Image (cartoon, helix red, strand yellow):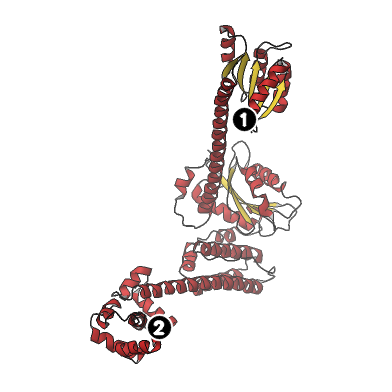
Amino acid sequence: MIKLLIVDDEQLERDGMQTILQKNFPGLDVQQAKNGMMAVEMAKEYSPDLILMDIKMPVMNGLEAMEIINGEHPHIKFIMVTAYDTFSYMKAAIKLGVKDYILKPSKASEIVHTISKVFEQIEQERKRYVEALQQKEKWQKTQMLVETDVVTQLLFDHVHDVHVNMLMDMIEIPSSEEMFVMVLHLPEGGEKQYSAIRKKVLHSGWTGALYGRQLPIIVFRQPSTTYRSQATSLARELLSLANEKEWFIGIGKVYHSMDQVRHSYQEAMLATVDTQVRKKYRFFEEIPLEPGKREQAMMDQKDLMEKIRQGKWDQVHARIMNSFTLLEKERTPLVYTQQRTLEVLWMISRTLSECGVETATPLFAVQPMDYRQLREETERLMSGMKDSYTERFNRMESDTFQLIKQFIKDHSHQDISLDTLAQKVNLSPIYISKMFKEKQGVNYIDFLTECRMEKAKALLGDMEKSIKEITFEVGYHDPNYFSKVFKKMTHNSPKEYRKTLLGQHA
């Protein structure tokens, strides 16, 4: 709805103008002011889109009022309404950005025409403003998605369609070459604060995606302060959003390149292992572990993740259990092994998610008190993820098999080979043959023959079709061979079967 203010010292003029406007512009919001001073005050409260301003008025004339209003509310448009068609007035009005003028007296049609043009400008500007806002919102959302994707690629072994270097061209990269990672451990419901967290970090780093209860943030070093001061200050700002809830922040060490920032993330994860400390944030250096043990935390997970993608669960299980044995033999503190194990389980879960397998967030149901309990909890979580993987791929295999069967039914009249099917579903011919034996109980040729015979039975119901025509329609080239196969499958020749159908119709 457009709002319009009529400013004139003559009541009759104001009322007449309002009548014309409301008759020709239904829904228009109109108010009146009897002088320039009143117009200035009403512009603040009413905020009109357009003012019809008389020039000659007591207290404050129209040009003075326009100058004040234009300075305070530059978006408001003006149409001059005057009986004085003089150059000096026009020149002053043009300087103030007047869109048009109406001479007194004017016909109603002229008034409507003049005001309509300005209304069109207002509507166009509104449309452009809304479009600009929408574009800005879309760009902000795009930047947020790109930012989280960049963080994910930098911190994890994820494979993406768009390389991280290309994504970084789309977002602002701080000039600092040094960075560190903070990991927020959030309680149930903490994800509701994601926007507020991102706003706090906006000018100092990149916020990743929330996974489970862990939210990673890459923070760029500020040369004007020390690393610990910067990290402590940001941690306290973030914790101010917690509203007495159990938040905890782990802080990794500073690294000098994007390639190394993953180490800082893993350190920050380790720093969140024990949240029952006095402070609600902790630096990696404060963890009571020997330097050699810390370095073990930086093992590359690429090989393990590849085994997950290939479904080699026995090898994955053996590797993790062997790690338990080694760490326990070296008397590694349980708290370290527990956090390291969770990190590996989270990576497995993320890899499964990339493969289209959805799993519950891997979290220990109980707090392990020794290595035996830690093994049991780990095996329980791995078993659940393995079951999800198996179920998903069994379902995919079942869907693929149904696709193969339907393809055979639809094209049984053609010469379909195992190689043709293999190319259709991107599987090996041997594997397809095995699927038929396991899932259908027959080989591929038997199923194709069954489909052809079912089609032949339907065609034999059409008495106008000859046996020879049906032979070719179901995919055979020799009527004698077709009859032989048909009798073997149905215990009747095609002619005998057709007589049976005729008897049923009779």
Q: Which residue is mark 1?
A: 25
User: x, y (%) of residue 191?
Assistant: 66, 54
Residue sitting at 48 percent across and 44 percent down?
Answer: 168
Name the foreground residue: 452 vs 101.
101
Image quadrant holding the N terminus, namely top right
User: x, y (%) of residue 235?
Assistant: 68, 47
Q: Is residue 289 left or right of residue 310?
A: right
Residue sitting at 58 percent across and 41 percent down?
Answer: 221
- Whether the residues at callouts 1 and 2 have beta carbons within 8 Å, the answer is no
- Residue type highlighted by circle 2: Lys
Q: Residues within 10 Å of mark 2 (few under 14, many from 20)?
A: few
Q: Which mark is residue 437?
A: 2
Instruction: Classify mark 2: helix, strand or loop.
Output: helix
Relative vertical location of residue 80 with respect to residue 294 in this rendering, above or below:
above
Residue sitting at 67 percent across and 24 percent down?
Answer: 18
Instruction: Classify mark 1: helix, strand or loop.
Output: loop
